[in-house]
Every structure is written in structure tokens, then in C-alpha cells.
Amino acid sequence: MFKKNALLQTLFSLKGNPKACVYTEPLWGIPHSLYSPFVSVYMAALLMTDRQIGLVASVTMFFRAISALLSGAITDKLGRRKATIIFDILSWSVPCLIWTFSQNFWWFMAASVFNGLWQITENSWTCLLVEDADKSAMVNIYSWVHMSGQLAVFFAPLSGLIVGKLTIIPAMRILYFFSFVSMTLKFLILYKFCDETQVGKIRKKETEGMSIFQIMSGYGGIVRQVAASGEMKLSLAITAFFMVTSMVMQNFFGLYTTQNLGVPEHFLALFPIIRSAILMVFLFVIQPRLARFGFKGPMLTGICLYIASHLVLIVSPTGNIVMPILYTALEACAHGLVMPRKDSISAMFIEPKERARIVSVMTVAVLGVTIPFGYISGWLSDWNRKLPFLLNIAIFILAFAVILTSRKLSKSHISKIAAKG
């Protein structure tokens, strides 16, 4: 059984940087999954309004856009390995400490400046993961990246227990400090066991003696290259759709379920347990059987499940925990269908030699679209807590139409792209 499982074969055959990236990911994914269900409730407990919560999300997006603009040049100049360790610590270790001791809105604003820098390490880490990897194994590699974060299922009861025992504010301070320790350890281990990629060595040599801004002077050509590529424009659109919807779900699910549906705060830990368990089974058992269906069919099915999950949440009666659980189950299956393919599309459709700068330009474009939606969703939530989820449904419908009508996601076109890689 195990020998025939494509996911396990991929995991055990990983070498070099892909192995280091995948194997260390739980040290980031576990603590992030532990605290993330409670973030908006923690903010509300510190007397922040829905609009302030949305504004913090938009500010984070703004600084992600700035760091994304610089990320390609910084990644090429410093090298993938060095850029990753520096900006991992600045964008995750530092804000985790700030969140640990936060007192009000302004602490979260300060943390958002540092946290926004993670777009640099997102670029450099992605280069570490994919540049020396087997392109034909990209979906399985990204499946493991997503699955590794789901290992939090074994620890999630602890976060619910801490919140139930200590209440939300002291519990979150403990979870954030644990995240600081675990994530920092991950960054140090990854730095030790990864090497600079072949493309990274070339770009580092080519940019030697050049300033960051000199490297960025070539961005005009990169912008034209992205604008001329149908594949990269499609990747931009898909990434933007799901970045907005993920931001809304992350920021307002906890508030809606606790303050509108009457779910006790410590029960928020139950949803990651269910989500992780379903997603791990889905990725391990079902995902390997979907390869023959290509990209389009599974992604369209996943979007339908996303819409169904949101409708379930919207019609959920107060005091009924079954409906939020059903939402979580549907959303987990949708995530398993959509996200590994979305990430694979981005990895495959980008020219390898200029990956860092192309990712930089594309991310700036995506974040530029996304920035207003943090405040917009907060404003909608202040008016009616169901409205952010209706906004998501509208975006899912638009994503469905784009993917359905795209010829770039046909099996033959994807096969040609993979062969070139």
C-alpha cells in the first residue's frame, strides 16, 4: 500500500532543499494553527472593533506589498538561504513577541509592520522549495507542505484547554510565546540543512556589486514579461481570489461563531482539529487518486465546496454547533482540492531564471488588489457579521468563471509546461 502511494513516495524521495523545507514546516505550521483560530477574538478581548481588526489586516497587506516589491531583488542579492533566515526571524519571531505582550490596537499595528515582511521570505523560501525540485512532483510536494501544517490536530486540544482554563488573553500570550520559540527553532534548522539553489548562485553572482535599487531597475522588463504571459496573468487572478477569501475567513470566522452563533471561545480549538483531520485524510487518501483529472475539474469542485461551506455558515442558527462543524468539513475538502493546485500553477507558470523577480512583481500586483479588502470586510462585519462571507461567495463565483473558461488549465497545456520545467 505504502509503496503504491504517490504522496509517500514523494515524501521519502525528497532530497536537498525540498526535503529541508517540507520536513521543517511543522515547526511553523503547528504553532500557527494553534493560535490562528483565536486571533480576532483576542483582538476583540483587547477592545478592538471589527473595523480596527480589518484595518490591521489591510496594513499587514500594505507592508506585504512593499516587501513583495523588494523581495525579488533582496532574494537575488542575499541569496535564497540568507534572505530566508533573516526575514523569517523579522517577520515571524519578532511579531510573535509583540503579540505576546500586546495591550491595544497600536501593538497590533506595530506587529503588522514586521509581519508584513514575510512576503520576502515567502519569495525566498518558495525558491528554496521549488528551484531544485522535480517539477512533475510539484502537486505532491505542495500537498505535503499543506499537510505538514495540519499536524496541529494532535496539539489543538491543548490550545482549547488553555483558553477554557485561563480565558482568551492569558492563553493567547502563552500560545504566542510558544510560537516564537518553535518558529525560531524552525528557521535555524532550515538554515543549517538547506543550500543555495543553482539558480540562486547564478543570480547572486550576477547581482554582485549592485544595490537593491539597481537590481530593481530591471523590473520594467519583468512587468512586461508578466503582462505578456497568459499563464502568469491567470496565476495572478487565481492567487488574488483566494488571498482575499482566506483573509476574510481568517479574520472573521472566530468573531462570527463566538459572538453571533454563541459558540464558546474555547470551542474554537475544535474546528482546527476537525479541519486538520479531514484535510490530512483527504490529502493522503483522495489526493493521489485525483492526478488523472488534471487541474480544472478538482479546482471547480473545490470552489463549489467553498460556496456550500459559506452558505452553511450563513444560515446556521444561534447555539447550533453542528452547522459550523459542517462548514469546517466542507472548507477542508475545498482547501485540499484547490490550494495545492493553486500553488503548483504559480510554481509551473513562472520562468525559472527570473523566478524571484517575477514572484516579486506578481505578488505586488496581487496584494495591491487585496489591500482594500481587509478594511472593506471589517466595515461589512461592523454592519452585519454575515456580509464578509457573502463577499467571499461573490469572489468564489468569479473564480469559478475564470477557471472554467481558461484554456491554460487544460491537461495538454499543463503537460507542456511541466515538460519545459
Image: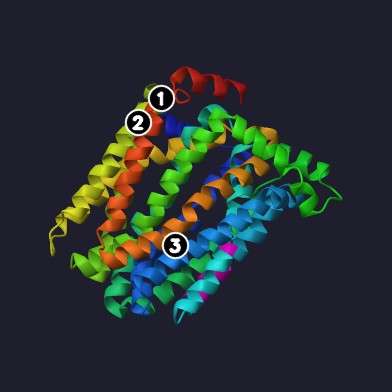
Q: Position of residue 217 (x, y in %)?
A: 77, 46
Observer-nearest residue: 211 or 329?
Answer: 211
Q: Which residues are magenta?
A: 91-99
Q: Which mark is residue 11?
A: none
Observer-nearest residue: 233 or 125?
Answer: 233
Q: Secondary structure at mark 2?
A: helix
Between marks 3 and 1, how big is the CA–CA gap?
Answer: 33 Å
Give the residue pinned by disc 2: 298
Please state which amino acid type lies under the numbered disc 1.
Gly
Give the residue pinned by disc 3: 31
Q: Are marks 2 and 1 in contact (CB under 8 Å)?
A: yes
Q: Quadrant of residue 411?
A: top left
Residue 94 colored in magenta in the image = yes
Q: Residue furthest bottom?
A: 103
Q: In the rendered image, is residue 153 in sight?
A: yes
Please state which amino acid type lies under the numbered disc 2.
Pro
Within-10-Å neighbours for mark 2: few <14, some 14–19, many 20+ = some
Please state which amino acid type lies under the numbered disc 3.
Pro
